[in-house]
Image (cartoon, grey):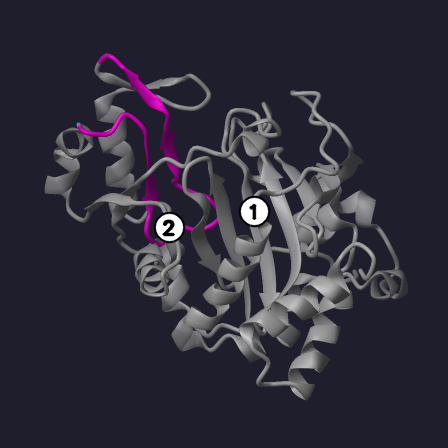
Amino acid sequence: MPDVPQQVKGKWWHRWMRTPAELRKLGVVGINMRNARFLLPNNPRALYRLVDDKLQTKALAETEGLSVPETYAIIRSPHESARIEETLAKHAAFVIKPSRGSGGRGVLVIDGREGKNYVKPSGSILTGDEIRHHVSNILAGLFSLGGQRDCALVEYRVRPANEMTEISYQGAPDIRIVMLHGYPVMAMLRAATLESDGRANLHQGALGIGIDIDTGRTVRAVHHGKPVTRHPDLEIDLIGIQMPGWDKILDIAVTCQEMTGLGYLGVDLMIDETHGPLMIEVNARPGLAIQMANGVGLLRRLEPVAAQHQLHPGAGHSEKIEYSRKHFGASGK
């Protein structure tokens, strides 16, 4: 069987059913190739702790002057978990997430209050006991990498810019940028649908929307691996939408590579209506569905960057952004 992205198996596998030669021609990168050629040689194991723990990542980002969601509280013990409602008393809206979670697992978004209860973006209601139970599960390591005991972060609930709310069903969309040696190589917006229950998770039915690296405009969209041009629930056109603050988004992405030292990584951001682009997290093992969202195999961008890095290992921050915009924009993909 050809080495295809793990994410496209199951529902999406038939859309990528190609011969190995066809996949190579398309430049499709699968799990095995990603790991062997790009991830393992460029990501020293000792650096993973900097991004696998969101507390450490945020501390690094703040040291670099990057904008991140404000931390309201860190819950580390059952005693603090039992008093979570006292901790949350000052905040009508917030996000609770595991510090060592991955893939969006364990993230709980609260949009407001209804009496003593809490309202999710979907409109469903949670009681204080349910909030405490969720935090207890985080502390027990239910959502963490390797099942290790964890702590819970309570953060500012990002209020997406208008351009973002218009193309995402209830939930806040996020932007993923994949990087190699500090060069942005591919970008994607993940937007929620009714099917995904307001979550920007492609496996649960969210939209993957490719973004032009040069302009920050959306160029292609997929839903369950099938190309679409309109949101299935909102009937909004998905192509040609300008991401606000695109220059800053690219700058944040490159800074994340510099501060972590990882050679191959994914940077996740959200665009807040008040604070602009915010760095949400850094991923040392970014998935591969971004290729479908853009309709371009990653190898077509990773190989030129690997060659460029070999020729110019000392390239600076701005040079890397300039190179990526020139070579990976819509006209040069």
Q: In which quarter of the image is the N terminus?
A: bottom right
Q: In the figure, residue 145 lies in which quadrant?
A: bottom left
Q: How many labels does the image show?
A: 2
Residue 186 lies, in percent from the top left, at 67, 58
Graded by Cα atoms within 10 Å as few (under 14), some (14 to 19) or many (20 or more), the crowding at tag 1 reads: many
Q: Observer-nearest residue: 219 or 225? A: 219
**Residue at the image position 26 percent from the left and 53 percent from the top:** 149
Q: Which of marks 2 and 1 is in front?
A: 2
**Residue at the image position 15 percent from the left and 46 percent from the top:** 77
Assign a secondary structure to mark 2: loop
Amino acid found under the numbered disc labelled 1: Ile
Residues shaded magenta: 90-115
- Find disc 1 in the rendering and name its residue: 175
Is any part of residue 29 visible from this angle?
no
- Residue 68's disc is 2
Q: In the figure, residue 116 lies in which quadrant?
A: top left
- Left-right relation of 168 to 105: right
Does residue 104 belong to the magenta stretch? yes
